[in-house]
Structures are given as C-alpha cells and as structure tokens.
Amino acid sequence: YESVHLVARLLIMRLSIEGKEQLDIENEFWKMIFLMAKANNLEDFVDFNQLRSLTNVLIVYGIVKVPTYIRKLISSGVLYSPNQKVKKFHCDLLISLKIQPVMKYQFNMVLKKVDDKALTSGFHFDQLVSLAEQCKQVFIAKSEDKTLLREAPGCVKIMVADWYLNSLVSSIGDEEETPFIESATIKRVYSHLCLDLQQFHHFYRWIEFIVYHQQLSDIGAMEQMIDILLAFQKLFPLLINDPLLFMKSTINLYLNKLKSVDSRSFQIIQFNSFWKFFLTSFDNLLQMDASLHHQLSELCEIENERLREFSKANHQLALTSNQQLGKKFRDLITAPNEEELANDRLCLLSIQIVSRQDYAKYIP
C-alpha cells in the first residue's frame, strides 16, 4: 500500500542528492509512459491502478505535470494511431489524473482528437464535473450506496476528495468556535477518503490539521486516529510531513488537554504501541531531538507503571464489571447503543488490564 508514495519520495531524494533538474525526471517519466503504452503484454508486468496512483502522487509533489503530458500526447501523433490499445491506455490514464479547470480546453482537445466515442464518451471535462457533483451528494445525503463513488474515474475521485477536505478544514473560522473531532468522525472521514475515494494523501493532510489545531475531543478519538496510523504505519514517514512536530503536537494534546477532559479513558486506554513505534522507526530523527526521545521513553515507563497501579487498585471493580458485562452481552448484540458500547468497552479494557484470563472470554 505504501509503494507509490515510497517511489515518489525516492525520486525527490534523487532530485536533491544528485542535483538533477525536475524537468529531466519528468521527461524520463513520460517517456516511460509512452513506452508502456506500446507494450504488447503490459498487463503482465504493470498494475495500471498502481501506475495511475503513482502518477497522481508525482503530480501532488510537482515532479510531473498533466499539461506536459497533454502537450506530449498532442505533439507525438499517438492520438491518431490506428492502434486502439495505445489510445485506450492514454485515455484511461489521462482520465484518472488530477485535472484542473484551467486545463479544460486542452483536456477536451485530446479527447476530441482521439475521435473514438467508445473511449471518450462521458469523459469531457464538463461531464466529469457534473459527475463529481453527483458524487458529492452521496456524502451530503449520507447515502449507504457508494457504488457511484467507487466506480467514478480517478480525476472525479480527486475532485471530490479536494472538495471534501476543503469542507472539513474550512469549518474553522475566525469567529467560530473550534469544532471537536470525535471517534465516529475519524472513522467516517477515513472511510470516505481512503476506502471510497482511495485518497490517502488527503486523509493524512486532515489528520495533520486536526492534530496541529488540537481538535480531538477525547482519548477515544485519539485512539481511533492512532489505530489507523498504526494500521498503515509504513505511510507515516511518507505522508506526515514533519514527524517530530506531529509527535510533539500529539503528546501535547494528550497530556495537556485530553488527560483532564477524559480522565477515565486516560487511565485505561494504552498508547505504548504508538510511542514504541515512533522510538523504533525514527531513531535517526530522535538523535537530533534528545528531549522528545526522553519524553517518549518516559511515557512508556509511566504508562506501564500506571497500568500496574490500576490493576492493583481496581481488581474488584474489574471483576464486578466482568459480571455485569456477562449479563448485558446478549442485549448489546441485539440492540447496540453507542454510548453503552463505549462505556462497556472501557469496562472490557479494565478487565484486560486486571485479568487477561477473564478478558479472553470475550474475544472470539
């Protein structure tokens, strides 16, 4: 899942280390694309979805540009080729890329020159914008049917992701109270951006935004965010622009805000896996910030000690919670209540800390 972002970062490193011009990399990339289009057995060695994703990531970083691709398509004469396979490759790729409104004329010109309705029907710029508006309504109406979103061309998904991200971050105004982000919101945004639209880059921009603006509502929301970050931990160093600043902001949010507003969860929910992940994965960076390294190590020790003290002090409480959960378990399955589920989850985590044997009874 991290491969296209890793390739993009390696190209950026190559540009900085070798001092190569961005134009050289771009020309080499588009040359490779034109060679791929002519390959007879392309599907045997190229995953088109990965190629499309890589191209869009390179566009985000400014390494390649869609207008350059359009100019090369027009000047190469490939649009007049009798080879339908070559034209289909280029049409499919172009329609999957991030298209700006200023490119509308050139984009439509390419489709017109292809002169094959089977390849271009429904894909003119205005038609794509119209489709994007329909996809936005899926979010606005909170529809459960995501078929339209998931089957939309890549450029439409990017248009919708841009709009959705902008709507999320623009909710903060100079005269408005900062909105707090709950666990359910994080799950919903992850589902929309990563599952429905396959735009991880947008999701990580939003995660950075809510952490730097200290918007998480409670420990549960922080846990939800960290669960996703750890599930895709290879993306963390690739999509978090400044890992040290991000971690400092997360710790500040955790200790100076969430600890006091959600003290019960603070005692129970564990984040050692995240602190240890950062200590292990960013050892080189932490050598330049001894203070953060010490703070993370201290957090690990403090959490271990806190859990030991909690286990001793709450042994009887956890056993009582165990009995109560056993009685309520059937009711929770048949008629789940979000507030009760959250409370009972904390009870279950309390049992895990005190008695793993009792906790195992609730795990399939």
Image (cartoon, helix red, strand yellow):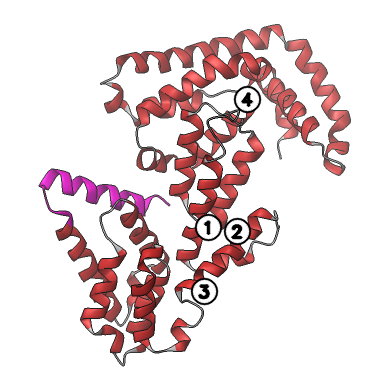
Residue named by callout 3: 127
Q: Decide which of tag 2 and tag 3 comes sooner along the chain.
A: 3
On the image, the x and y values in percent for residue 110 come to 34, 79
Please name which of the two marks, 4 or 3, marks the residue nearer to the observer.
3
Judging depth in this view, the residue of 253 and 230 nearest the camera is 253
Mark 1: which secondary structure? helix
For the stretch drawn in magenta, the main secondary structure is: helix
Which residue is at the front of the view, 214 or 201? 214
Real-space Cα separation, disc 2 to disc 1, in angstroms: 6 Å
Q: Which mark is residue 160?
A: 1
**Vertical comparison of 357 with 37: above or below:** above
- CA gap between label 2 and label 3 equals 14 Å
Q: Which mark is residue 168?
A: none
Q: Is residue 307 above or below residue 106?
A: above
Disc 4 element: loop
Identify the mark at residue 218; answer none if there is no mark: 4
Q: Classify 10 Å Cα crowding around label 4: few (below 14), some (14-19), many (20 and above).
A: many
The one of 213 and 85 positioned closer to us in this rendering = 213
The front one of 147 and 94 is: 94
Residues under numbered marks 4 and 1 in contact, where contact means CB atoms less than 8 Å apart = no
Residue 297 place in picture, x, y as percent: 41, 15
